[in-house]
Amino acid sequence: MTEITEAIQRHSDIEFIPVKLPQKRAEIALKEGSVDFDFICLEWLKTPEVGPEYVISEPFFELKESFITLKKNVHLFPTRESLYNKHVGTIAGYFYFDDHTFIRTDFLDENHLVLGLKHERFEVIILEQETAKHWAKVNDVDIGFAVLHSKGNFLMRIRKKHQGLLPLINQAIKQIKASGELQAILDKHNTEINIFN
């Protein structure tokens, strides 16, 4: 996200001060006003609405989160129902709108989550597809995508008190998309993500 934030800053002249927080703490900090924005896909939330205290930016691109397993086990998870009450590897502090349907097994980060799958601590994890491909390659894990978990637009969620900055932010997003800068950032990370124009 740092590269995207830096690109928006260059095109908008809005200064962003990055704050690294675990997701759960970041959510609290956003609600309390300690931070002014985050990046989110509304489909990750239990109620996919932005809420009255926030505004959202133009979409950057589409993200797909899947239930991911070892390639040899894909056939075990053909439907969402096949995952009910199963242990599912997740990231501590991340949002899962349907986590009442499975048993969360929280890991610190995406790397450790994929390693847990490799060592068969559980049979399935939830992860964004491009992130999963990256960590599978790093850790030499033969993964397969089972059923889709969520699909939606990747957005900036901004505290409403800063809604006056939204036109500048949206213009900057349009510029980094039109100039190819956003695509270059994604290509640098070897992703196959659809950018919305």
Image: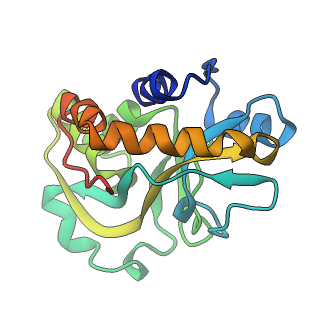
Q: Quadrant of residue 134?
A: top left
Q: Quick check: 184 left or right of 102?
A: left
Where is 49 relative to 36, above or below? Answer: below
Q: Quadrant of residue 161?
A: top right
Q: Is residue 63 visible?
A: yes
Q: Is residue 91 visible?
A: no
What residue is at 67 percent from the left and 38 percent from the top? 165
Q: Nearer the viewer, residue 187 or 57?
A: 57
Counting from the top left corner in percent of width and height, residue 74 is at 20, 66
Counting from the top left corner in percent of width and height, residue 144 is at 18, 57
Q: Coloured how?
A: rainbow
Q: Nearer the viewer, residue 130 or 12?
A: 12
What residue is at 74 percent from the left and 52 percent from the top? 54
**Image quarter hosting the C terminus:** bottom left
Where is 82 relative to 169, above or below? Answer: below
Q: Nearer the viewer, residue 121 or 181?
A: 181
**Image quarter hosting the N terminus:** top left
In the orientation shown, which residue stands out farthest toward the right? 32
Tally of numbered discs: 0
What residue is at 22 percent from the left and 32 percent from the top? 184
What residue is at 29 percent from the left and 73 percent from the top? 77
Counting from the top left corner in percent of width and height, residue 139 is at 21, 30
Counting from the top left corner in percent of width and height, residue 15 is at 62, 19
Q: Quadrant of residue 35?
A: top right
